[in-house]
Image (cartoon, rainbow, N blue to C red):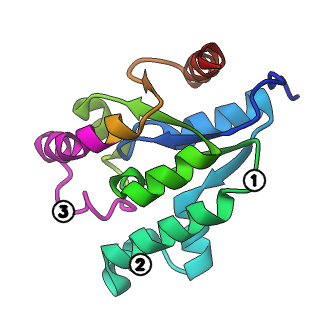
Amino acid sequence: MNNQPEQILHNIFLIGFMGSGKTTVCGCLHKMYGMEVVEMDSMISKQEGMSISDIFTEHGEEYFRALETELLAGLRDQNNIVVSCGGGTPMRENNVALMKKSGRIVLLTARPETIYERVRHSHDRPLLENNMNVPYIAELMEKRREKYEAAADLIVETDGKKAAAICGEIMQKITSQM
């Protein structure tokens, strides 16, 4: 069922730290508003034929970041998509510029403790693999906070909220900005 308001003609790029809820919210926006979902990490993994962790190990972070930029450039002519960006995607200014050209950037936030609870059993987070603890997560989040906030057109907290409520809040904020 497609409930998408007619005036929402641009894309939505979800940014935020790993575990902030980007994948879950993408699924919800798809279900509630019929938006096509693009999971950047999944697309890159499929394209490269290996996991994100293996890409980092075999080719390095810079190579992976270049793949993110290439993927964003390929999305610029599409409409009605919601993109779950990798946690480091907005750290590159050219990525932010590409996203702003074709949509709105929504920063999803959560407390370090919430992030830890959401990702602690995951082994698909190369930057946390040997540092799976709240202090390290808090430190890395703080290092990224300024760039995340500068990139964001709007910010939505996800702590203690259901996905449907987050999706509704995003759409309400986007439509009120138009």
The residue nearer to you, when weighing 122 against 112, is 112
Q: Quadrant of the N terminus?
A: top right
Q: Amino acid at mark 2?
A: Ile
What's drawn in magenta, residue-wise? 123-147
Mark 3 vs mark 1, foreground winner is 1
Q: What residue is rendered at 77% in x and 29% in y? A: 33
Q: Amino acid at mark 3?
A: Asn
For this orientation, the residue located farthest to the right is 1
Residue 78, numbered label: 1
**152 in the magenta segment:** no
Query: Quick one: label 2 or label 3, which is nearer the N terminus?
Result: 2
Residue 156, numbered label: none
Q: What residue is rendered at 49% in x and 73% in y? A: 67
- Residue labelled with disc 3: 130
SS at mark 1? loop
- Residue labelled with disc 2: 55
Q: Horizontally, is 109 left or right of 128 in the view?
A: right
Is 30 situated above or below 3? Answer: below
The residue nearer to you, when weighing 148 against 115, is 148
Q: Is residue 58 visible?
A: yes
- Per the model, the C-alpha gap separating discs 1 and 2 is 27 Å
Count of numbered marks:
3
Query: Quick one: label 3 or label 1, which is nearer the N terminus?
Result: 1
Q: What residue is rendered at 37% in x and 30% in y? A: 109
Which quadrant holds residue 167?
A: top right
Mark 2 vs mark 3, foreground winner is 2
Mark 1 vs mark 2, foreground winner is 1
- Per the model, the C-alpha gap separating discs 2 and 3 is 17 Å
Image location (x, y in percent) of residue 156: 44, 23
**Cβ atoms under marks 2 and 3 closer than 8 Å:** no
Is 43 situated above or below 128? Answer: below
